[in-house]
């Protein structure tokens, strides 16, 4: 994983696996959690490929200025929806081009960049690759993009829901490969359907790994680009799981994660869910062909409290990850929820300062 860091002079970066002083593995380390799920695949003669699509919002304020303003009244880099807009994206191209070029210099394979719907919202995509390499690239890019923005006296946020407009997602595409490197889904439709059925069966109890923060759950809104129903469909963007591609390109897109995910944990969750479906020989339900927001389907957890409790009680999570991992991330959720509950929000002051 040793690579140059072009945006920091004379710097290289190394990603490593955490160990305690006695040499034993740090079991709850996200990278190790993913590696263990990949090892479970390898025992079956399989591997995983993945791609993550990170959205972010660019502001013309520096990070220091944004902090001084209390992260209010910031100036977005675009003043209108620039989804597929040549003019809108050109106005932010100096920053976006530098991020693309610097990431290429760090060994990441950039495929594209485009504008999105929220003001100042953009997305840069990288080559679909082996799952661990994709997760490593994700964290390098996410940290590097913020460092580069800071050098340009601008700022970037990867919050799942910065404001009342569109949230920032991180859709994850995933497929399995056989020992020859070919798409296992293309050769074995039954395996594909069981993998997909596993995603559906486990989605609610693994949501904590797809939506790891209090803010994550504000992104799940009816009629938005974020799902609310645990459902799948063929090229159906209203579903939590969207099946795309054909032949060697056949894959599952998980639309639940936001831009605030830990990619190692989210990919580990998808692999664990898929293996559950394969090993349990789960049958795949019929796809949703229409609007999944109004379909009679199980709902995505709406709060971190609900997701935490589902994860804590999940037999699948305990079996796939081990109780130490489950207890660690339940504890982390409890700490964030306790901190959140102690805060007095601007909404409360606006609503109650005079009237209560």
Image: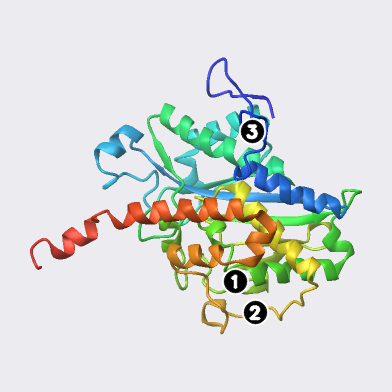
Q: Report the residue marked by disc 1.
A: 239
Q: Which numbered disc covers residue 19?
A: 3
Q: Where is residue 290? Give x, y as percent.
A: 60, 80
Query: Which structural element holds mark 1?
Result: loop
Asked whether, in this view, residue 103 is left or right of residue 122, the answer is right
Disc 2 crowd rating (10 Å Cα; few below 14, some 14-19, many 20+) is: some
Q: Where is residue 327? Give x, y as percent.
A: 54, 54
The answer to whether 89 is drawn above or below residue 223 in the figure is above
Whole-angstrom CA distance, mark 1 to mark 3, is 39 Å
Whole-angstrom CA distance, mark 2 to mark 1, is 8 Å
Whole-angstrom CA distance, mark 3 to mark 2, is 45 Å
Could you tell me which quadrant the N terminus lies in?
A: top right
Disc 1 crowd rating (10 Å Cα; few below 14, some 14-19, many 20+) is: many
Q: Which numbered disc covers residue 288?
A: 2
- Give residue 319's quadrant in the image: bottom right
Name the residue at 64% across, 57% down.
269
Name the residue at 64% across, 27% down.
14
- Give residue 75's quadrant in the image: top left
Asked whether, in this view, residue 82 is left or right of residue 66, the answer is right
Q: Where is residue 256? Give x, y as percent.
A: 56, 62
Q: Where is residue 156? Give x, y as percent.
A: 43, 41
Q: CB atoms at circles 3 and 2 under 8 Å apart?
A: no
Query: Which structural element holds mark 2?
Result: loop
Could you tell me which quadrant the C terminus lies in?
A: bottom left
Disc 3 crowd rating (10 Å Cα; few below 14, some 14-19, many 20+) is: few
The answer to whether 116 is drawn above or below residue 240 in the figure is above
Q: Please state which of residues 273 and 293 is positioned toward the viewer in this rendering.
A: 273
């Amino acid at each position: 994983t040793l690579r140059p860091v072009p945006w920091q002079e004379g710097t290289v970066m190394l990603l490593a696996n955490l160990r305690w002083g006695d040499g034993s593995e740090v079991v709850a380390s996200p990278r190790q959690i993913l590696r263990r799920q990949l090892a479970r695949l390898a025992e079956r003669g399989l591997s995983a490929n993945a791609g993550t699509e990170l959205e972010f919002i660019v502001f013309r304020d520096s990070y220091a200025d944004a902090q001084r303003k209390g992260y209010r009244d910031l100036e977005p880099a675009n003043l209108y929806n620039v989804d597929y807009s040549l003019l809108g994206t050109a106005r932010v191209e100096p920053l976006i081009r530098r991020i693309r070029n610097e990431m290429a210099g760090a060994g990441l394979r950039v495929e594209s960049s485009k504008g999105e719907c929220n003001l100042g919202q953009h997305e840069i995509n990288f080559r679909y690759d082996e799952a661990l390499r994709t997760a490593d690239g994700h964290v390098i890019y996410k940290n590097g993009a913020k460092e580069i923005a800071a050098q340009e006296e601008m700022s970037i946020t990867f919050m799942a829901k910065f404001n009342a407009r569109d949230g920032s997602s991180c859709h994850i595409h995933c497929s399995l490969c056989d020992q020859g490197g070919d798409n296992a889904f293309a050769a074995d439709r039954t395996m594909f359907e069981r993998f997909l059925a596993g995603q559906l069966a486990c989605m609610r109890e693994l949501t904590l790994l797809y939506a790891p923060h209090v803010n994550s759950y504000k992104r799940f809104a009816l009629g938005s680009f974020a799902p609310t129903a645990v459902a799948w469909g063929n090229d159906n963007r209203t579903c939590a799981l969207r099946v795309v591609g054909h032949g060697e390109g056949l894959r599952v897109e998980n639309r639940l994660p936001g831009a605030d995910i830990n990619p190692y944990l989210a990919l580990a969750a998808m692999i664990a869910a898929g293996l559950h479906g394969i090993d349990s020989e789960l049958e795949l339900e019929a796809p949703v062909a229409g609007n999944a927001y109004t379909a009679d389907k199980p709902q995505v957890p709406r709060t971190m409290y609900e997701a935490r409790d589902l994860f804590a009680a999940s037999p699948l999570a305990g079996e796939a990850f081990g109780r130490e991992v489950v207890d660690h991330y339940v504890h982390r959720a409890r700490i964030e929820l306790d901190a959140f509950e102690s805060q007095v929000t601007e909404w409360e002051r606006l609503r109650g300062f005079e009237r209560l």
